[in-house]
Amino acid sequence: MNHSLNNHAMPLWRQIQQKLKQEIFDGVHEPGERLPTELSLAKRFGVNRHTVRHAVTGLVELGIIRVEQGRGMFVQEHVLFYPISKRTRFTETVEKQNRSRGRRIVSTDTVKANSRISESLRILRGRPVIQLVSIAEVDDRPVSVSSNYFDKSRFPDMAKYALETLSITESLNRCGIYDYFRKSTRVTTRMPTRAEAESLKQPHTRPVLKSESIDMDENGDPIGYAETLWAGERVKLVFDTTD
Amino acid sequence: MNHSLNNHAMPLWRQIQQKLKQEIFDGVHEPGERLPTELSLAKRFGVNRHTVRHAVTGLVELGIIRVEQGRGMFVQEHVLFYPISKRTRFTETVEKQNRSRGRRIVSTDTVKANSRISESLRILRGRPVIQLVSIAEVDDRPVSVSSNYFDKSRFPDMAKYALETLSITESLNRCGIYDYFRKSTRVTTRMPTRAEAESLKQPHTRPVLKSESIDMDENGDPIGYAETLWAGERVKLVFDTTD
DNA sequence: CCCTATTTGTTCGTATGTATC
DNA sequence: TGATACATACGAACAAATAGG
């Protein structure tokens, strides 16, 4: 019998559910952190393990808690809804969700276009392209690692501008591209390498989303190709096809 | 020295590359199958392991072979490019890629709308909805497992029609919906459960794509909500945002 | 590779209170 | 009052996944 809970004839499991919800809301358990085990929660509340499980199922349904067999229960991270439409802009997208954002340039380089890059940018294979590797962060946590590719002969100073402005959109502005549009986006999934998991600060046992996207100018000509890895647990790509 | 390869002064690695490509094209190694180990290939061609690796990297670049550290090299399955746009139809989509297709109804049921379903269909939580679980197959291999949800009060006979026609589009036709549109699609990734991996006939150590999609009628009112799991290794979702 | 400890998932059985007919 | 169904709660055992040595 637990007297601190036993009131109002409300079922035990519901009382526990509300208590846990409140604690998570109050920040007792941070997003992403592991919750106490079922057994220890059962002990704490003075109930059977089943009762705790019953309480938790509702919170899983609500997307507040995520359960992983053999690992434990975790407070669900706030997933970032990342809308992808004709005009996709990282900065605008995130600020609408009241999150802080940032971009870190990892490296800039000049490489030869492989088949995928050359097809996307409609240039010859082997031509020099500027590779821009960057990490996008939301609420001080990395959400994606991108490799952006630009035709070097068309945008010779992209690398410099990117390092100065830390923004793709702004860099393109300085190159004379005042507006651009998302042409297509391909999405797959795979397991990350150790290094990729490290960059995204996520366990390497969890999958990532991979997107290959092409941006174009007003004439429909490609201006940039990008391959982006997204932290699978913290991101939902949203495609709106209403118009 | 290997005399069967050594001709035309073509580099050994390139000869090996072409030989492997030819074998895969000829079906000696089936898509998805494991290739011989680097070492055994090296032995077979009478070259050093490095030479084989050099040959393989080119095939990886071309998307013909996939290498998984510690597991081996695999012939890349033909990925299905699944375009998602305003008008998304499974049948049309697949036939354009000259693949055979099929849909298997796993179960039909009447369940209560959870929060996600009710929000998507704009009905009250707990209202009865028809759940339609089906497996889509391409070239006799499952590519996705879908749960489609329809408001039971609006489409009371969906389950019956689906079992008869094995097609969502056709079933909606019989319900008086002669045209419908994709409203939005959300994409994430996660690891599959054992049962899900089994349904998709894929290793349970490989991730799946999850999409949550809403279809609407001409008036913009929702008519169906679906959660779909895609075999991550065999599918690329393609979002075209040109119009 | 096996082995072990930890943790969640599943399935039994049991008991009690409550609502309904 | 009795019969029945359902929700709540506990206990035990085993299965399955994970993590670490």
Image (cartoon, coloured by chain):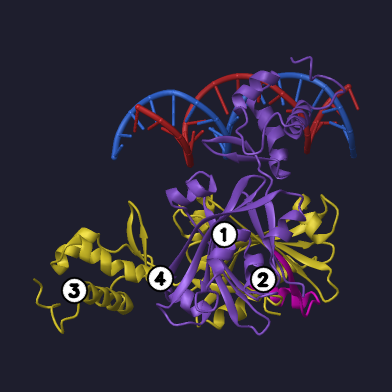
Chain colours: A purple, B yellow, C blue, D red
Which residue position holds label 3? B12
Comparing labels 3 and 4, the label whose residue is closer to the camera: 3
> Pointer 2: residues within 10 angstroms few (<14), some, or many (20+)?
some
Quadrant placement of the N terminus of chain B: bottom left
Q: Quick check: do tags 4 and 1 share a chain?
A: no
Q: Position of residue A198 (x, y in %)?
A: 48, 46
Q: Amino acid at mark 3?
A: Leu
Q: Secondary structure at mark 2?
A: helix
The x and y percentages for residue A223 are 58, 76
Q: Nearer the viewer, mark 3 or mark 1?
A: 1
Q: Residues within 10 Å of mark 1 (few under 14, many from 20)?
A: some
The residue type indicated by label 4 comes to Gly
Work out whether disc 2 and disc 1 sit on a shared chain: yes
> Residue tagged by mark 4?
B63
Q: Chain of mark 3?
A: B
For the magenta stretch, what is the residue range?
B166-185
Classify mark 4: helix, strand or loop. loop
Q: Secondary structure at mark 1?
A: helix
**Residues at marks 3 and 1, common chain?**
no
Residue at which label 1 appears: A163
Callout 3 crowding tier (Cα within 10 Å): few <14, some 14–19, many ≥20: some
Q: Is residue A31 left or right of residue C6?
A: right
Mark 2 belongs to which amino acid? Asn
Q: CA distance from mark 3 to mark 1?
A: 42 Å
Distance of label 2 from label 1 (alpha carbons): 14 Å
Amino acid type assigned to the residue bearing label 1 in the image: Leu
Which label's residue is closer to the chain start, 3 or 4? 3
